[in-house]
Image: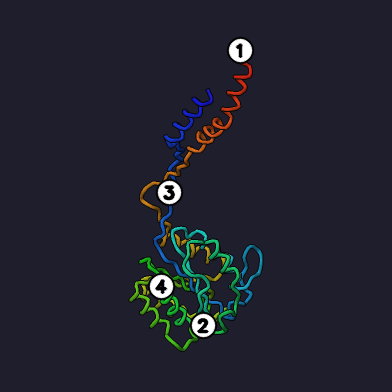
Amino acid sequence: MALAGCWLSLLAAASSPRYVGKPAKKTKTVRSFLIVTDISLSMATTDWHVGGRRLTRWGAIKSIMKGFVKDRKSDQVGLVMFGTNAYLQSPFTTDLETVSWLMDQTEVGMAGQMTSIGSAIAYGIKVFKQDTIKQKIMLLLTDGIDGGQDISPLDAAQAAKRDSIKIYTIGIGQARGSGGYDLDEKTLKDIANTTDGQYFNAMNSGQLKNVYAVLDKLQPVVYDEDVYKPVVLLYYYPLAVAVLLALVAPFINAIINLFRPSS
């Protein structure tokens, strides 16, 4: 009996039984999404409120942006931080949790005191050149005006356009010289228009969340055309039964022989 059960279990395992789950959508990486954000000293100004707390501009922005990043499931996301200089905080990756964590580790002033928008865009272009995905999106956030000397923002935007990079710009706060801000909205609009992107303005956390909601609609999550059905192989269950029966078969036979009446 044990050997027969072992044989049947092996046949069941060889048939490769499996459980096919309910159909599910599978995300597809279609974009390289580079976030280029200003961390110059002005971003340390404490004039934003999030959840009843008074935060610095950068503290408020990254608390909201982390949620936005986690929802970019069909993108590989990179981070470039800039002030006087620009540097790569995170290369392109689909590990969005790590991107959010690296963003959280960034503090104002780490890239210098000034706001070099043109240099930041130029640096972002270099980051894209090392990537192979064709759809390239840059999100540029700043609360200031360009103070760099290497390349003007509009010249950098023209270079981005030649490389098929679309730039969405977000101006943090009010126009130049009002409300404690020194924002050059015209330049940010021109950058976006040059690259077929779009300019947004955010004066508080609610408006910034709305901006991210619009961006989600403009650059939505993309799924594979084929419906994904999760499959779980079950062959190891009958295989385990076969192994167990093979191990206990000698003991069963011995017990049977022990109680079998002698002739």
Q: Earlier in the sequence, mark 1 or mark 3?
A: 3
Q: Which residue is mark 2?
A: 85
Q: Give SS at disc 2.
A: loop
Query: Within 10 angstroms of label 2, few (less than 14), some, or many (20 or more) residues?
Result: some
Q: CA distance from mark 1 to mark 3?
A: 67 Å
Q: Earlier in the sequence, mark 4 or mark 2?
A: 2
Q: Earlier in the sequence, mark 3 or mark 2?
A: 3
Q: Earlier in the sequence, mark 3 or mark 4?
A: 3
Q: CA distance from mark 4 to mark 2?
A: 20 Å
The mark lying in front, picked from 1 and 4, is: 1
Residue sitting nearer the eye, 177 or 99: 99
- Can you tell which mark lies on residue 130? 4
Q: CA distance from mark 1 to mark 2?
A: 95 Å
Q: Which residue is mark 3?
A: 25
Compared with 119, 97 (above or below) is above
Task: Please name the amino acid that badge 2 sits on.
Answer: Asn
The mark lying in front, picked from 3 and 4, is: 4
Q: Which residue is mark 1?
A: 262
Q: Residue at x 47, y 58 (%)?
A: 73
